[in-house]
């Protein structure tokens, strides 16, 4: 990558070069934006938080959130596509839970810290 000359030199050129290299990786930042976009919806945050604590099927998720099954499915799809939740099929039933990834664990902790709640036992 070609080093850019910044308008003001504050004596931190090596540090700024490293920052510029990281900032040029737009794809990485796009991936992060996609994850946060999923959590920009209250219903998706509620579903994600619940699935951090249990594995559940669409019908039970819908009942817990007082929503229709199609509405819940609509919210589960982007959460699964973003890698925040996983699913498994058992017969005709599909069960969902939070993905066991560092990103999912971090988002779970962030939700609980912001809301000042703790995991149910």
Image (spheres, rainbow, N blue to C red):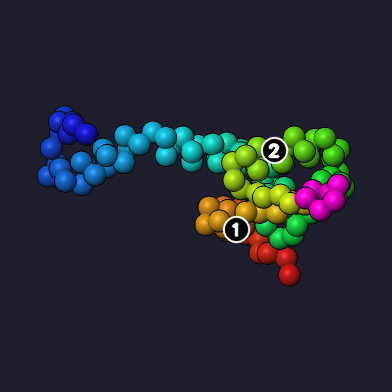
Q: Residues within 10 Å of mark 2 (few under 14, many from 20)?
A: few
The kind of secondary structure element at disc 1 is: loop
Query: Which part of the image, by quadrant, shows the C terminus?
Result: bottom right
Question: Residue 10, percent across and down?
Answer: 14, 41
Of the image marks 1 and 2, the number of the one nearer the N terminus: 2
Which span is picked out in magenta? Answer: 89-94
Q: Is residue 61 left or right of residue 98?
A: right
Residue 115: percent from left, percent from top: 63, 54
- Would residue 93 be counted in the magenta stretch? yes
Q: Which mark is residue 77?
A: 2
> Mark number for residue 39?
none
Percent across and percent down for residue 60 are 85, 50
Q: Quadrant location of the N terminus?
A: top left
Residue pictured at 46% horizontal, 34% vertical: 30
Residue displayed at 81% across by 53% down: 90
Q: Main secondary structure of the magenta part?
A: strand
Residue labelled with disc 1:
100
| Front one among 13 and 69 | 69
């Amino acid at each position: 990558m070609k080093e850019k000359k910044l308008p003001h030199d504050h004596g931190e050129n090596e540090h700024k070069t490293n920052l510029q290299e990281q900032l040029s990786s737009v794809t990485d930042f796009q991936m992060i934006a996609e994850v946060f976009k999923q959590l920009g919806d209250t219903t998706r945050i509620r579903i994600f938080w619940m699935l951090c604590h249990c594995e559940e099927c669409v019908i039970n998720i819908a009942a817990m959130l007082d929503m229709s099954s199609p509405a819940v499915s609509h919210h589960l799809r982007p959460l699964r596509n973003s890698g925040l939740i996983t699913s498994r099929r058992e017969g005709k039933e599909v069960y969902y839970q939070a993905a066991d990834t560092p990103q999912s664990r971090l988002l779970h902790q962030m939700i609980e810290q912001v809301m000042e709640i703790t995991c149910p036992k």
